[in-house]
Image (cartoon, rainbow, N blue to C red):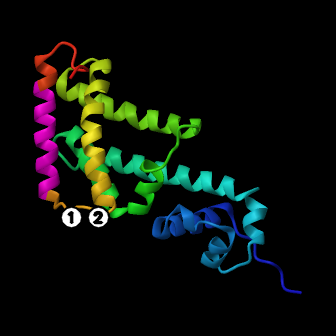
Amino acid sequence: MPRTPHYQQSAILDAAFALVRRDGMEALNARAVARELGCSTQPIFRVYSSMEELRRAVEQRAMTYYTERIRQSASLDARAYRGTGLAYIGFAREEPQLFRLLFMCDHRSDTHRQAEQDSSMDYVLSTIQHATGYSREKALLFHHVIWIFTHGLAVMVATQFVPFTDEEISRLLSEHYLATKARFDATEHPSGG
């Protein structure tokens, strides 16, 4: 009797990640991953105790992939904070399924994911503080105002609701940044209307 091939965890995760990246998280199931691997579902459940465990691993890989792209963005733009916004929207354009998974779903109860977001938030806040001289608290308020706008653009790009060009996105981000900074610099307590 021929020996059953053993699939390593990395191969299974690679196949699941590729599937989700192409077709979205809703396409992730044992049969679909097995099809990607060219095997039965048994190897998947030898490595992962449940599909939920595999889903969490895929989401963690997606967050790691996203975080690496954001960190690389500082070298792509002379203004590091704008670079993070451009990278966020670029991620939405180039990886719409991963963007939906990470930023268009309810993740309030996922404490592990929140810790990863806090890690990328440290980087983002440090770029704001470096560019503006704001305290961490003021930088966080500033980022929230900018992020709401940036996230809206990214969602429109990910869903192909509005076909913005790279030049339009860059101009919109710059205009919003300058307007928000002027407002924050003019007021002592920018959280008000």
Q: Which residue occupies 29% across, 39% down?
A: 148
Q: Residue 163: which disc?
A: 1
Q: Specify few, some or many for label 2: CA neighbours under 10 Å numbering under 14, 14-19, or 20 or more.
A: few
Residue found at the very far top of the displayed protein: 188
Q: Is residue 25 left or right of residue 136?
A: right
Q: Quadrant of residue 54?
A: bottom right
Foreground residue, 115 or 187? 187
Foreground residue, 127 or 158? 158
Q: Which residue occupies 14% across, 47% down?
A: 172
Give the percent coordinates (x, y) of residue 84: 27, 44
Q: Which residue occupies 56% across, 68% down?
A: 27
Which residue type carries mark 2? Gln
Q: Where is the N terminus found, in terms of image quarters?
A: bottom right
Q: Which residue is mark 2?
A: 160
Find out whether residue 4 is within the magenta segment. Answer: no
- Above or below 130: residue 116: below
Q: Where is the C terminus found, in terms of image quarters?
A: top left
